[in-house]
Amino acid sequence: MSKAFTKETDGDDDDELTSELALPQGVKNYMTPRGHALLQAEFDHLLRTERPQVVEIVSWAASNGDRSENGDYIYGKRRLREIDRRLRYLTKRLDTAEVVHPETQQNLEQVFFGATVTVADESGAEQTYQIVGVDEADPAHGLINWVSPLARALLKAREGDLVRFHTPAGLREVEIISVRYMPPVE
């Protein structure tokens, strides 16, 4: 088959979501106001600052002549593809985002999106989590996405409830110590 009819890529298909960021089919892309602002800031930085700088470097490198062995040109073009791919991804995520304001939650005694929940495990060790959107999750800082096993187990539970959830290490059980709604953790 002629190469004119085949699609050749450098191994980085642009619109494929990574499995950890993919939302279940038919599910809304919930975000906290902070998460939405962070994605918007990243989008603006890439579009208004980083991309124009890389375009300038690529233009300069292209004007130097032979592009086949021109590192600035080759790596600049690669970086432009990465930036454009990220901009497309961010555009899709921001367009489908549904911003949920945790502080306006009605049932303050129950766990819903945006809640900050303190739990105690079987040994009594306490841990605090905030249930946030998929794009803003950072488990190391207590921000868990609402489709994670722990968050799914916590949803609709109340203070004093015991919840069970599956982890790679097996079945775990935690007790809900407190539920609060406040602006996201910084």
Image (cartoon, rainbow, N blue to C red):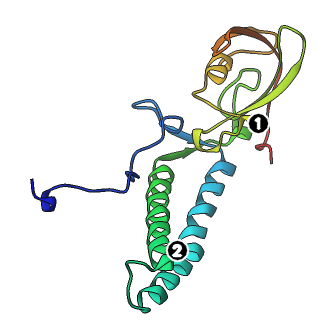
Which quadrant of the view contains residue 31? top right
Mark 2 residue element: helix
Query: Tag 1's secondary structure?
Result: helix
- Residue farthest to the left? 1
Of the two numbered discs 1 and 2 on the same chain, state the one appearing first in sequence.
2
Residue drawn 50% across and 67% down? 79
- State the residue in front, 58 or 88: 58
Name which residue lies at 90% across and 12% down: 124
Tag on residue 51? 2
Q: Residue drawn at (75%, 15%), measured in percent from left and top?
A: 158
Foreground pick, 56 / 38: 56
**Residue 95, horizontal then vertical, whole percent:** 46, 53
Please rate how many residues cluster around mark 1, counting C-alpha atoms within 10 Å: few if below 14, some from 14 to 19, many from 20.
Answer: few
Q: In this view, does 178 lie to the left or right of 99?
A: right
x, y (%) of residue 155?
Answer: 65, 20
Left or right: 64 as drawn, with respect to 103: left
The image quarter containing residue 6 is bottom left
Amino acid found under the numbered disc labelled 1? Ala
Mark 1 touches mark 2? (CB < 8 Å): no
Q: Position of residue 113 (x, y in %)?
A: 65, 32
User: The residue under label 2 is which amino acid type?
Assistant: Arg
Q: Which residue is label 1 attached to?
A: 140
Q: How crowded is mark 2: few (under 14 residues within 10 Å), some or many (20 or more)?
A: some
Counting from the top left corner in percent of width and height, residue 175 is at 80, 11
User: What residue is drawn where x is 70% and y is 15%?
Assistant: 157
